[in-house]
Amino acid sequence: MPRFFLTDNNVSGTLVRISGDDAHHVARVLRLRPGDHIEVAFGSGEIGIVELRTVCRDAVEGQIVQRFRSYQEPPLLLRLYQGLGKGDKMDFVIQKAVELGVKEVIPFVSQYTVVKLDSAAASKRVQRWQRIAQEAAKQCLRAELPVVMPIVSFDRVLEELKAKTQDELVLLPYEHEERLGIKSVPVQHCRGVSIVIGPEGGFHPDEVEAARRLGAWVVSLGPRILRTETAGLVALSLVGYRWGDLG
Ligand code: SAM
């Protein structure tokens, strides 16, 4: 059954109204008819079954006939701070990170970032990545729509991490770290994990030390150098296995 993500203004009582691309998809691509059913995600971790009442190309209306809590969201809030990668690497990273349960992807620019984007290009990329996140979330049956944030500087990342290290886990994988692995981080329970992955050129040592001073755990992902688009997914998988709902 196809799944659609709703915002508050789509729902009024038990009535659901979908418009725009999603309405077109229901009417013209899926060719659904009144009486058919679709799944909706309310964004609160709840899922609903909607029986279609009217189906037009630009608007679809239906009645919520079932509403239940989803088990498909991870038990902890996952954020991926991803150093901007070249080409379509970010497309791949965002798609896979959504499948692995990420709630937010925050692309960033640091000292060794190769990609340079002006503000117009940057906001177009973020819009594209958000569409990729939405499609991936529909495909893997997420109950909440992950968000791709605007591209920020590494200084901004450090400011955000400073607030997070109080009650969440911040992990910065670094290929020159030889001792501490994710399985040995001495934290048994956490409600949120932020993972910070460097770009193709990696982190400047000063960037690593700045994050460590804020309370980030600098960790190894193993003895081999992983590509930037591999490293985040490995870290999300290990975190999901140790503290989340993977494996
Ligand atoms: N310095 C790397 C090199 O020599 O090619 C470039 C950085 S690597 C392509 C991109 C990012 O992936 C790194 O900044 C780090 O965050 C992460 N990474 C890659 N391999 C890692 C490893 N074995 N342990 C921890 N982090 C790793």
Image: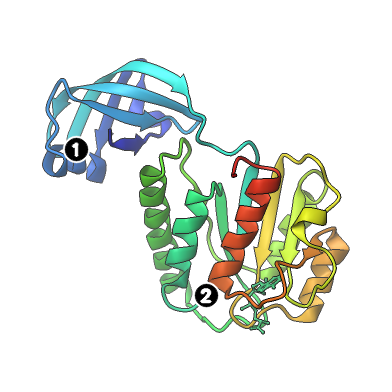
Amino acid on which the number 2 mark rests in the picture? Gly
Q: Disc 1 marks which residue?
A: 26
Q: In terms of sequence position, does the residue under pointer 2 or pointer 1 come before the other?
A: 1
Q: Nearer the viewer, residue 128 or 198?
A: 198
Q: Position of residue 192 (x, y in %)?
A: 70, 44
Q: Would residue 72 appear left or right of 200 to someone viewing this image?
A: left
Quadrant for the C terminus, please: top right
Q: Would residue 59 appear left or right of 126 to someone viewing this image?
A: left
**Does the Cβ of the disc 1 residue fall within 8 Å of ligand 1?**
no
Tag 2 secondary structure: loop
Q: Is residue 15 above or below residue 70?
A: above
Mark 2 and 1 residues: CB-CB less than 8 Å, in contact? no
Q: Residue at x 79, y 80 (%)?
A: 205
Q: Position of residue 121 (x, y in %)?
A: 42, 73
Q: Would residue 142 appear left or right of 84 to someone viewing this image?
A: left
Q: Is residue 150 above or below residue 118?
A: above
Q: Residue at x 49, y 51 (%)?
A: 98
**Does the Cβ of the disc 2 residue fall within 8 Å of ligand 1?**
no
Mark identifier at residue 85: 2
Amino acid on which the number 1 mark rests in the picture? Val
Residue 28 lies in quadrant: top left
Q: Position of residue 49 (x, y in %)?
A: 32, 23
Mark identifier at residue 67: none
Residue 108 lies in quadrant: bottom right
Disc 1 residue crowd, few under 14, some 14–19, many 20+, Cα 10 Å: many
Residue 19 lies in quadrant: top left
Q: Nearer the viewer, residue 141 or 57?
A: 141
